Image (cartoon, rainbow, N blue to C red):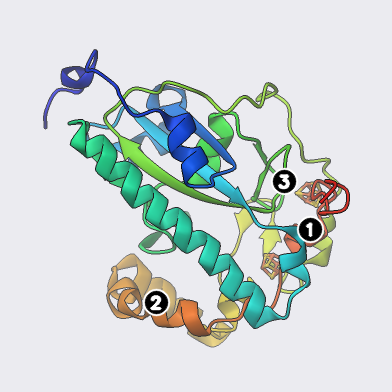
Amino acid sequence: MREASQWIGRRISLDPDSFFREHEVDIFSEVSVSVLSGKDRSSVHEFLPEARSVIVFGREVPAFVFTMAAKEKTKEMYRIAGSLDATARSLAECLNAEQFPSVPVPFLFPVRIIDGRVQGLVRLKQIAAAGGLGSIGKSTLLLTPQFGPRVVLGGVVTARSAQKSGGFERPESTLCTGCERCIRACPGHAIGRDGVDAFRCQSLSTWIPLCLVPAAKWMLRRALLLRFVGPLVPWIARHAAMPCSLCVTECPVCPTDTEKGK
Ligand code: SF4
Ligand code: SF4
């Protein structure tokens, strides 16, 4: 492993403000690994040993998208996620060209099971919260001051030091009112005190019936599910239909387009 100090003081020419403006990104933060929880710091270092920061960024999902039929809504969500994925690849390329080793965080897969819960290799929601983009609600979604939970995230782990933080000035407080509307509205009873059980969420349970969950978890622990499902992701993205978004739309921190003056 190369020494992280090797990248300190290197000339930085990428201007994130103009880069993200050009890529139509709504919010972003450069988060130093030093401000992350121990758990997130280790997974970031596991992902890229030379990591000094994570650049996390997001785009709003307009409120009207959640009024669309399931299939159209899903298509639109994947379109936004796909554009963030492309932005992450392009950002990583720019940083690598400047000799800062950088890796885009893949959207959706691979994932892993920690404490019985499915999570990404790098937890972008928690990192975004640590970087001042918002706070984590009881729904486990990132709640942002601008868009509530209506936001999709992308990210790049990099050896470059953090230059600019997100600007949500109340990291010690929370945007979540604690109303528990997300918990009551959830048809799969997926949201509990210790997070969301992804296999109970209707977005996944339509694909993996409850009786197959133990087998799916077993395969996931051994990375077998990813080997089989990974190549199917583009097909799933084209044909899936997320039947439920109630944890987003029921949240009072979710301003509508009208409220936002659109
Ligand atoms: S999307 Fe629906 S089923 Fe899934 S956690 Fe949210 S409310 Fe529950
Ligand atoms: S619905 Fe209420 S409890 Fe759930 S995340 Fe939103 S504000 Fe928090």
Percent x, y of residue 258? 87, 53
Residue 147 tag number: 3
Q: Quadrant of residue 49?
A: top left
**Three-letter amino acid code at disc 2?**
Pro
**Three-letter amino acid code at disc 3?**
Phe
Whether residue 69 can be seen here: yes
Percent x, y of residue 145? 73, 37
Percent x, y of residue 248? 74, 58
Q: Quadrant of residue 143?
A: top right
The residue lying at 48 percent from left, 39 percent from top is 20
Q: Badge 3: how crowded within 10 Å, few (<14), some, or many (20+)? A: many
Taking the view exactly as shown, the residue that stands out farthest to the top is 9
The residue lying at 70 percent from left, 23 percent from top is 170
Mark 2 or mark 1: name the one nearer the start of the chain.
Answer: 1
Mark 2 or mark 3: name the one nearer the start of the chain.
Answer: 3
Q: Badge 1: how crowded within 10 Å, few (<14), some, or many (20+)? A: many
Determine whether the beta carbon of the residue marked 2 sits less than 8 angstroms from the nearest atom of ligand 1. Answer: no
Q: Nearer the viewer, residue 182 or 154?
A: 154
Q: Badge 2: how crowded within 10 Å, few (<14), some, or many (20+)? A: few
Do tag 2 and tag 3 residues touch (Cβ < 8 Å)?
Answer: no
SS category of the residue bearing label 1: helix
Pointer 2: what residue?
234
Pointer 1: what residue?
182
SS category of the residue bearing label 3: loop
Q: Nearer the viewer, residue 149 or 180?
A: 149
Q: So how many labels did they put on this image?
A: 3
Question: Where, quadrant-wise, is the N terminus in this rendering?
Answer: top left
Q: CA distance from mark 2 to mark 1?
A: 29 Å
Determine whether the beta carbon of the residue marked 1 sits less than 8 angstroms from the nearest atom of ligand 2. Answer: yes
Do tag 3 and tag 1 residues touch (Cβ < 8 Å)?
Answer: no
